[in-house]
Image: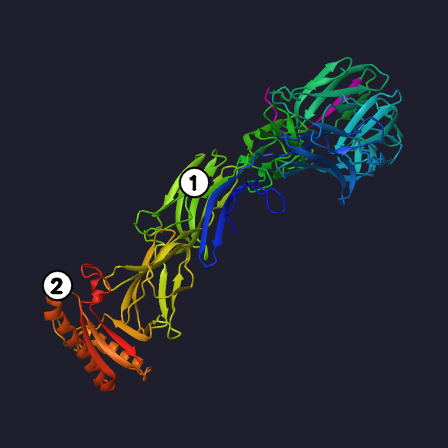
Amino acid sequence: NSAPESFEWDGLDEAGDAREDGVYSYRLSAVDRAGNRFSTSLSNIIIDTEETPIALTIDRRYLSPNGNGVNEFVGVTIDVPVRRNIESWEMIVRNASGASVFRLGGGIAGPPESYEFRGRASDGSRLADGVYSMELTVRYRIGRVERAESPAFVVDTTPPRAFVQIETDLFAPTGDGIRDTMILYHEAEQADHWTGRVIDESGDLVHEVRWSRLPSARYEWDGRTISGRLAADGRYTYELEGVDPAGNRFVTAPVSFGLTTEDVDLILTAEFDAFSPNANGTRDTITLFPQVRADQAVSSYRLEIRDESLESVRSFQGNGSVPERIVWDGIDREGRRIPDGRYSAAMNVVFETGVEASAETGTFVADTRSPEIQVTVDHRIFSPDGLDGRQLIRFRQTGSEETAWNGQIIDAAGAPVRTFEWSGRPQAFDWDGRDDVGNRVPDGMYRYTVASSDEAGNSVEYTLDDIRVDTRPARLFLTVDAPGLAPTGNGLFDDIGFSLISSLTEGVTSWELRIEALDSGRVVRRFTGSSLTREQEIRWNGRNTAGSIAADGAYRAVFSAVYTKGNRPRVQSTTFDLVANPPRVVVRLDPIPFAPDGSTDRDELEIHLDVDSPVSIDQWSFEILDRNRRFFNEFFGQGMPADVIRWDGRAIDGESVLSAEEYPYVLSVRDVYGNETVVEGSIPIDILVIVDGDRLKVQIPSITFLPNSSALVVDANDPRGRQNSIVLDRLVEIFARYPQYRITVEGHAVNPSGTEREEVEFLGPLSLQRAQSVRQALVDRGMAAGRIGTVGRGGREPLVPHDDLDERWKNRRVEFILER
């Protein structure tokens, strides 16, 4: 195959979908026909796309598309901040079972910024009552798909129902304990609120009471009007009106009843059931309304304010007509403010005829103590993004028992976004960052207020400020600057660098970079801090917490952070290697000895290279040397070497190996981090029988003699002697294969002077004598003396020039000529 071509990656996977943001790497590998392998990689390819979050918000949770003009539609705000490269969009309304009931869509122009959904299906028919939601899908040309879902909303066209009954159609609120109240019984469905109204014969509103969600099952009206006075005798009607969250309205049929006080001469009523004489401007006084019904002139009157033990604490008296109202400010006759408690008023009237009349109010309460409330939270910043941050804030509340408590989450502009109601004691609750409709509120500062007013008009408001919603994404990226490290001190890959990239640097309480072994997850080193910059670098020298070099193996780095808003993002690096030890290498040669003479099946040497390395091999070489460690041949490559190298015994220039020689080799294997292993050994060469025309020849330069002597070195304690014995023994074995051949032993020498005189006087005789010594050694090993002749050639037949100081050792040799 040809070399790989350049290409561009658009961030899409094989299926054509856009990949998620993160760190990627590219790896290229190849294997040639000889089995040589090579690989390389490019790390730290970061995909960090432009954020394209979309959102659907609605302006109400309930709609009632019944044509009455109330809550006829849901206003939808469609937030698509990135509108370029839009391919298509679609908005679907689904019912509670997930079925589509309405679709709206379009192309590159994108969706409108707002839309009014009027509760109609795609065919124009009105939707059935039930729960629905909207789903928006925006597809971009780059393959990215964004989705958003609205809060659930309710289609409700059915008004709530209720029924009212009365116990009797006439009551007499005279304070005598007999039919003093009109008892009303309610049966109703749950609604947003219910309102009970008492209306006189003229159609004017006399009394009104309001309930949240459900009316009281039993309600008593004591005959007092909105102003606190007793209503006039006459006929009245009562109706109960309910309005549900969708705006559907229902009013019960009016029930009629009568109010009469004609049998009494004096009636006394109190304006309130409770007041708060604390001079705060709210219900500081209570008004008492006396009504004289007798048709007689009043001589005098006296009104007593009594405590629970009926002891008088204040009195009002006078002569003549009784005033329409008497106002009491809660001060006793000594000028002191009365203590909180239950009180009542009693009045006595003396008519000019001497007849007396008396009346009493019901009990009313003096209460100057405000409701009590305490609110605590564990934190004031959270990130309700549906991901890894704090998704809610828990408000813990302790307070006094009151008729109603009202809580509000208020934005920075002062607008309430979420409301809460409790009766009795305020309860703990969780805020999930959504408004009353269910939309997520925007990021920003908020405050929480909770308030209550009791029946006496005492009120309290508690405010908790500095509540922060922060859904800014806290994304982390982690890159490494090398595929690994080799902390060996060779200056190549002694450490590795990590780039810690943070999209959000504000609000970090702590961060950690830990190095962990890939196989076990064991953490070998930690780096920590309490603040982050946009990008910072940490270098690791491969040492663990104890200061020792960590074990060889695959590792990864894990970068995490903790934010005050609760986010705990975590990202891990690509895998990297720590290799402090060089490759493990074993060399095995086959056959041994090696005989590349064409006469046997041992002509080719298999060099088996067993290389074990946890990381890729950068390069290797297998160098073969001669006896003087001069270069003879070499095999080399990049990547992992082939399992077997085959050698024919020739040098790089074609020269063949010599018989009975040992050729040193040096194997060097270096991994991609510079760790290198060098293995040395030798390749023993067998006796080579070479075809030379019509004869056979054996050349051996390794038979050694004593200096300037024909005596063979035979001492078994001398390596040369041991080598001579091995060679001579092997010659006997080889020659046994050629019994029909006569053998001539030729001695050859080096003529360093190059003179004829040295040839005649010294080298010729010495080479002959050495040939004779070899002949005798063969005879001593059992060969027939008659097969072997000898010749002394001196230096007359050199293989290389005698003045080649590096190579002329080859001229000092013994040759064996085999002829039939």
Q: Can the viewer see residue 413? A: yes
Q: Quadrant of residue 260?
A: top right
Q: Where is residue 424 shown, x and y percent of the image?
A: 66, 37
Q: Tell me if 708 is positioned left or right of 530 in this view.
A: left
Q: Mark 2 packing: few (<14 Cα in 10 Å), some, or many (20+)?
A: few
Q: Is residue 571 above or below residue 87?
A: below
Q: Can the viewer see residue 273? A: no
Q: Which residues are magenta?
A: 335-350
- In the picture, the disc for residue 755 is 2
Q: Secondary structure at mark 1?
A: strand
User: In the image, which is nearer the foreground, mark 2 or mark 1?
Assistant: 2
What amino acid does circle 1 point to?
Answer: Ser
Which residue is at the front of the view, 284 or 376? Answer: 376
Q: Is residue 243 above or below residue 545?
A: above
* Outermost residue toward the top in this view: 320
Residue 478 painted magenta:
no
Q: Earlier in the sequence, mark 2 or mark 1?
A: 1
Which residue is at the front of the view, 1 or 666? Answer: 1
Which residue is at the front of the view, 425 or 790? Answer: 790
Which residue is at the front of the view, 100 or 331? Answer: 100
Q: Quadrant of residue 814?
A: bottom left
Determine which residue is flagged by label 1.
Answer: 499
Q: Tell me if 411 is positioned left or right of 363 in this view.
A: left
Secondary structure, magenta segment, majority class: strand
What amino acid does circle 2 point to?
Answer: Thr
Q: Is residue 574 above or below residue 355?
A: below
Residue at x 50%, y 37% (from the top left corner): 564
Q: Where is residue 716 shown, x and y percent of the image?
A: 18, 78
Residue at x 14%, y 62% (from the top left corner): 754
Q: Secondary structure at mark 2?
A: loop
Q: Are marks 2 and 1 in contact (CB under 8 Å)?
A: no
Q: Where is residue 128 shown, x and y percent of the image?
A: 83, 39
